Image (tube, rainbow, N blue to C red):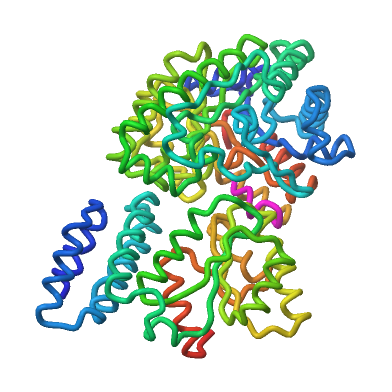
């Protein structure tokens, strides 16, 4: 399995979609395709996240790797598949910014890991809280680029509490990577330094650990 | 024995020559704080050249730092191209929805006229007024977005990465257009009295782009562009990493590199020695909650790591200090820079 993960990872970093598909086909000769997600895709994406954090992989590779995996997994687990829809309702947004790269990467990583989630796009505090209520969201991922946007998460947390909504808030983005105490200051339930961390964090939330 | 007191400009030029001046130069790259000084909103502050001139002069008098920073806001160039700017009460203006909606639009882009586009002439006017006020006492730093990094705001980061990898012809076309604009914009600022140009190029950082991709793209763009800019440049990675590409950055013809808090200042110093002057690397995000003791220690440590032998300008690691950083912290940073930055270093 290690060789397969290594080959898959290498194909992702080289943006070689064809090889990723060939590796999936090779795997499904002996296994069910859905296990490919957990055995190979999630492991490779975790590796990408770790290597990015170490400075060995560039963000452009993280983004393209996530997109390739998302497309591949959509073939195995199409949108609306019962294996996706049986999860807590989740959504992701960018707070107060039109720069969506971070959000897009996390969205791709989560979908490539078998999760289904709504993409709210760019939101301001009040409309975000309304959408969370309307959609009965249980896990909300908020991506930010700038410090003022990160600080606005405190307001999201307050409004969510005012409305007595039962939602866990996961945050990520540059300001949190430069201040490791900021996520607690804004009242988030968890912070992810990389997109792949969001996968394990959500699993912990589902498992009742966070 | 301490050296005779230098002007800010002499201090900066000496360190750029990889010699030790009288003390470590330090740049407080403050933009929005000028609005606080003048008691006005950020939007109002940036609406007139005169406000920025007054704000910058007051900030330098207050914090005794070694440059004038004639930087308004990052999406100023996007405004010139016809894109939107979103103002905030407590943060830098941000670019709105990317104006290149379809990559085919790249074929029809036209360069803004740097002599007549109002948002650009405002900056030219402030550069000229600042030069009249400051003369040769301190460097006036102007700003351009690198042609390689500007597309993040022009078309969105995700679409830009896809363009780079999947549409090389259109990517090259966009670079050609952006390079022409960047050169004209930088040279217009230099003609107006700007001393040096800060060339913001975060997409070239190893945080964003692989070294392999950088050498094929951002490196070539920077080398071509900087060769045509008629003044010194400082390449700034805006918090992104650069240790692995220091030698390549030096080959683009730039004199200074703005470095990240996430890379070792000692390693950077070793890599940059006699090639590039380091600008950095105080953490602006954390800075807002530093205690006076923490601020002094961090400044002292940075000077100790990168100060020996010159080739170092103390600054933040992003190229813009957040609005939320209190004056008290900035004052402690300034006092620590003056106290611990005296050459010979103790």
The correct choice, above or below, for A24 with respect to A53 in the image is below
The answer to whether residue B265 is left or right of residue B59 is: left
In the rendered image, residue B42, in percent from the top left (x then y), is placed at 79, 40
Q: Which image quadrant is residue B289 in?
A: bottom right
Number of callouts? 0
In the rendered image, residue B337, in percent from the top left (x then y), is placed at 66, 37
The answer to whether residue A25 is left or right of residue B283 is: left
In the rendered image, residue B220, in percent from the top left (x then y), is placed at 34, 26
Please say whether residue B310 is visible from this viewpoint: no
> Which quadrant does the N terminus of chain B fall into?
top right
Residue drawn at (79%, 38%) of the image: B43
Q: In the current view of this chain or complex, which residue is farthest to the bottom? A: A208
The correct choice, above or below, for B22 with respect to A198 in the image is above
> Which quadrant does the C terminus of chain B fall into?
top right
Please say whether residue A171 is visible from this viewpoint: yes
Asked whether A90 or B267 is in front, the reply is A90
The answer to whether residue A186 is left or right of residue B51 is: left
Q: In the current view of this chain or complex, which residue is farthest to the right? A: B39
Residue drawn at (73%, 21%) of the image: B122
Residue drawn at (31%, 73%) of the image: A42
Indicate whether residue B120 is drawn in magenta: no
Indicate whether residue B284 is drawn in magenta: yes
In the rendered image, residue B312, in percent from the top left (x then y), is placed at 53, 31
Asked whether B289 or A165 is in front, the reply is A165
Q: Which image quadrant is residue B112 in?
A: top right
The correct choice, above or below, for A174 with respect to B122 in the image is below
Q: Which residues are magenta?
A: B282-289
Residue drawn at (71%, 70%) of the image: A156
Q: Which image quadrant is residue B29 in?
A: top right
Asked whether B229 or A88 is in front, the reply is A88
């Amino acid at each position: 399995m290690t060789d397969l993960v290594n080959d898959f990872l290498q194909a992702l970093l080289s943006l070689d979609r064809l090889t990723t598909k060939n590796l999936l086909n090779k795997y499904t000769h002996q296994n069910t395709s859905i296990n490919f997600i957990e055995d190979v895709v999630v492991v490779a994406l975790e590796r990408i996240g770790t290597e990015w954090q170490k400075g060995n992989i560039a963000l452009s590779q993280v983004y393209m790797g996530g997109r390739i995996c998302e497309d591949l997994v959509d073939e195995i687990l199409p949108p609306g598949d019962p294996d996706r829809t049986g999860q807590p309702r989740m959504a992701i947004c960018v707070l107060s910014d039109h720069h969506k790269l971070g959000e897009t990467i996390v969205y791709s990583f989560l979908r490539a890991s078998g999760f289904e989630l709504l993409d709210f796009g760019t939101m301001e505090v009040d409309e975000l809280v309304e959408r969370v209520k309307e959609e009965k969201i249980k896990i909300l991922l908020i991506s930010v680029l700038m410090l003022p946007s990160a600080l606005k998460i405190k307001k999201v947390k307050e409004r969510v509490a005012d409305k007595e909504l039962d939602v866990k808030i996961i945050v990520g983005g540059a300001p949190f990577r430069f201040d490791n105490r900021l996520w607690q200051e804004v009242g988030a339930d968890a912070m992810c330094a990389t997109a792949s961390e969001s996968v394990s964090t959500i699993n912990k939330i589902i498992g009742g650990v966070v | 024995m301490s050296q005779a007191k230098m002007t800010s400009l002499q201090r900066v030029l000496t360190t750029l020559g990889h010699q030790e001046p009288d003390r470590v130069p330090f740049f407080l790259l403050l933009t929005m704080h000028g609005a606080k000084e003048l008691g006005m909103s950020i939007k109002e502050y940036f609406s007139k050249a005169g406000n920025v001139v007054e704000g910058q002069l007051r900030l330098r008098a207050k914090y005794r730092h070694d440059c004038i920073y004639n930087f308004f806001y990052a999406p100023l160039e996007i405004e010139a191209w016809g894109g939107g700017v979103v103002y905030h009460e407590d943060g830098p203006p941000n670019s709105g929805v990317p104006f290149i909606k379809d990559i085919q639009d790249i074929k029809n882009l036209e360069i803004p006229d740097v002599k007549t586009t109002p948002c650009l002439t405002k900056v030219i006017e402030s550069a000229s007024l600042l030069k009249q006020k400051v003369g040769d006492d301190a460097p006036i730093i102007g700003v351009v977005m690198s042609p390689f990094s500007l597309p993040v705001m022009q078309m969105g980061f995700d679409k830009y990465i896809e363009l780079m990898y999947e549409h090389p012809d259109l990517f090259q076309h966009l670079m050609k257009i952006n390079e022409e604009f960047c050169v004209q914009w930088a040279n217009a600022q230099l003609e107006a009295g700007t001393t040096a140009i800060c060339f913001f190029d975060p997409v070239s950082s190893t945080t964003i782009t692989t070294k392999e991709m950088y050498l094929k793209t951002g490196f070539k763009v920077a080398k071509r562009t900087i060769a045509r800019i008629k003044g010194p440049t400082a390449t700034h990675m805006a918090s992104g990493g650069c240790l692995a590409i220091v030698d390549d950055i030096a080959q683009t013809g730039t004199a200074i590199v703005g470095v990240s808090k996430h890379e070792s200042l000692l390693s950077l110093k070793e890599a940059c020695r006699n090639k590039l002057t380091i600008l950095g690397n105080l953490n602006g995000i954390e800075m807002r909650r530093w205690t006076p003791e923490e601020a002094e220690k961090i400044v002292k440590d940075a000077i100790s790591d990168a100060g020996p032998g010159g080739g170092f300008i103390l600054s933040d690691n992003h190229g813009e200090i957040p609005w939320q950083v209190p004056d008290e912290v900035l004052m402690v940073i300034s006092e620590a820079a003056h106290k611990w930055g005296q050459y010979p270093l103790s």
